[in-house]
Image (cartoon, rainbow, N blue to C red):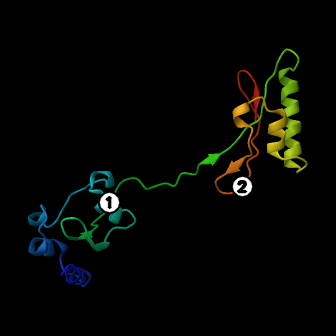
Amino acid sequence: MAQAIKQKLLEGADFGAMAMAYSKGRRALERGDWGWLRLEEMPTIFADQIADNKSGAIIGPFRSGVGFHLLKIDDVKGQETVAVTEYKARHILIKPSIILSDMAAKKQLLSLMEEVRNGRRSFADIAQEYSEDQAHRQTVVCSNGIRLIPTPLISKNSWKS
């Protein structure tokens, strides 16, 4: 039956009239209208079906524990979903000291970065040998496959790359 109702909807039948005639849901007499809801406010089974669809889509039939469902997205409003790019990166820490001035630390770090850029040494090898930050002695990794070679920046206590 749900497939026959969907076919009528695809042929142009009024969704509200079909909901009033066939639905056993709580909103049947309101023409099946849920009003505006965020995906987080919907039952998960509906949110999962709606998530990748656009305005005007007729979704289903799909089964839940209480029966079969058809959904229609009347409209979509609000902010667009934006993909977030995350990076997993490492740094080399050279700490200035009484023996090693800020400028000498920066010069050493820039020299090491030049070796990486020119392909003479790998970032991982340099980090293993020179970094004073034990937690970050690993290879630079970027989620899209691009190797990151950061520009050094100065913090209150040291130069970092």
Quick one: quadrant of the N terminus?
bottom left
Residue 146 in which image quadrant: bottom right
Alpha-carbon neighbours of circle 2 within 10 Å: few (<14), some, or many (≥20)? few
Residue at the front extreme, as displayed? 65
Residue 4 in which image quadrant: bottom left
- Disc nearer the start of the sequence (2/1): 1
Of the pair 43 and 137, the residue shown nearer to us: 137
Residue at the top extreme, as displayed? 98
Q: Is residue 100 placed above or below 20 in the rendered structure?
A: above
Left or right: where 79 falls relative to 22: right
Estimate the x, y position of residue 37 in percent, counting from the top left. 27, 54
Q: Residue at x 67, y 51 (%)?
A: 142
Left or right: where 102 falls relative to 56: right
Q: Is residue 64 placed above or below 145 in the rendered structure?
A: below
Left or right: where 56 falls relative to 69: right
Q: How many marks?
A: 2
Alpha-carbon neighbours of circle 1 within 10 Å: few (<14), some, or many (≥20)? some
Determine which of the numbered discs, if any, sits on residue 146 in the image: 2
- Is disc 1 placed on a helix, strand or loop? helix
Q: Residue at x 49, y 54 (%)?
A: 82
Q: Which residue is mark 1?
A: 47
Quick one: quadrant of the C terminus?
top right
Residue type marked 1: Ala
Q: Is residue 14 placed above or below 150 in the rendered structure?
A: below
Left or right: where 88 falls relative to 77: right
Residue type marked 2: Ile
Estimate the x, y position of residue 7 in percent, counting from the top left. 24, 84
Residue 158 in which image quadrant: top right
Q: Residue at x 19, y 74 (%)?
A: 15
Q: Residue at x 81, y 21 (%)?
A: 96
Determine which of the numbered discs, if any, sits on residue 90 in the image: none
Marks 2 and 1, how far apart at CA = 35 Å
